[in-house]
Amino acid sequence: MPHDYDEVASGDKRGVVVDLPAAAAYAPVSAVVTRGNFDACVATIGRHFLDILTDLNRYADVAEITIGKTYIKRRRTSRAPVERDNARHWGWEGPSSRWSNKYKKLNYNGLIVGYCFVRSDVPAGLDANGMDQEQLTLTYERAVTTWLRAQPVAGPLLRDGDDGGGGRRGKKTYAGYVLYMAFRFAD
């Protein structure tokens, strides 16, 4: 289960938190995704991550960030389907294991889940060509990272989150995939 945002953002705790856009912000992004306006969606998600970075810098100087993706499952005790803007229905195995197995060992301070893609986000034409929400999320991860690098913001080192593994690929398709920003404060 994720920690309180302020505790992790302030450096009091280390771990996974959620800072999703408000439900109203998801509607236009979802519409943009399904209409195929890729650049507008990348900019919207990128601005959300810039807002998170600005907020983190209120607490301490951020030295390094990584934009990445991981899977989420439907929570075992929930009968409701995964909703992109309601993290209460998510199982946290993906973000938690990404934190424990990678970023905690790299001495990062936190991992903030900032956006979720579900099956219905995949445009019909792409779905027919075999693209799933994991591939869509990976495409957005790379594009948002490139978008952030193009912004005139002096600050932290921005690392690539794609380590070549592509997540847990296989026959199983998960309920959703999230984009996150892992961060490390300056010493």
Image (spheres, rainbow, N blue to C red):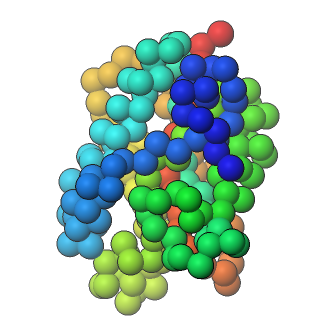
State which quadrant residue 100 falls in: top right
Image side of residue 95 versus residue 80, left or right: right
- Place of residue 87 in the rendered image (x, y in percent of width and height, measured from the top left): 52, 57
Query: Measuring 52% from the left and 19% from the top, which residue is drawn there?
Result: 62
Query: Measuring 58% from the left and 41% from the top, which residue is drawn there?
Result: 17
Front in this rendered view, residue 56 or 149: 56
Count of numbered badges drawn on the protein: 0
Q: Which quarter of the rendered picture does the C terminus lie within?
A: top right
Q: Is residue 77 above or below residue 86?
A: below
Q: Is residue 101 above or below residue 156?
A: below
Query: Measuring 49% from the left and 31% from the top, which residue is drawn there?
Result: 158
Image side of residue 29 versus residue 99, left or right: left
**Residue 49 in sight here:** yes
- Place of residue 1 in the rendered image (x, y in percent of width and height, measured from the top left): 68, 50
Q: Residue furthest bottom?
A: 128
Query: Measuring 45% from the left and 77% from the top, which residue is drawn there?
Result: 119
State which quadrant residue 185 falls in: top right
- Place of residue 98 in the rendered image (x, y in percent of width and height, measured from the top left): 70, 49
**Residue 141 in sight here:** no
Q: Residue furthest top?
A: 187
Image side of residue 181 versus residue 166, left or right: left
Front in this rendered view, residue 94 or 145: 94
Q: Is residue 51 above or below residue 147?
A: above
Front in this rendered view, residue 98 or 7: 7
- Place of residue 2 in the rendered image (x, y in percent of width and height, measured from the top left): 64, 45
